[in-house]
Image: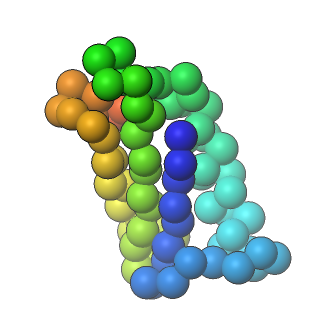
Amino acid sequence: MQIKMKVNGRELGAGSLDLLVLDQVKRKMQEKVAGLVCSEHLQPAILQVSGESLSALKVQIQACCDPMRHRVAKALA
């Protein structure tokens, strides 16, 4: 599973407080979707997390098919 994080249009560098908070968010997301692979296409999803601030993060799920996208969304809910 790949998770990319951007806040206010830029990827965060190591050592920032925002990065520490995002790291915890990333870990929780990884726990929820760990091991999810499409049974038909054998592909994991990619999560892209972005937003103008930490309080306004949006998650985009890139998956090989709609059923996989729905599985990941359900796991994250």
- Front one among 59 and 56: 59
Residue plotted at (60% across, 50% down): 26
For this view, does 1 lie left or right of residue 49? right
Is the C terminus in the top left, top right, bottom left or bottom right quadrant?
A: top left
**Which x, y percent locates residue 52?**
40, 80
For this view, does 29 lie left or right of residue 24? left
**Which x, y percent locates residue 72?**
36, 32
Q: Vertical placement of 27 versus 55: above or below?
A: above
Q: Vertical placement of 21 versus 74: above or below?
A: below
For this view, does 2 lie left or right of residue 65? right
**Which x, y percent locates residue 16?**
75, 78
Residue 74 seen by the camera: no
Query: Outermost residue, right direction?
Result: 15
**Which x, y percent locates residue 24?**
68, 51
Residue plotted at (36% across, 61% down): 58
Q: Vertical placement of 12 versus 45: above or below?
A: below
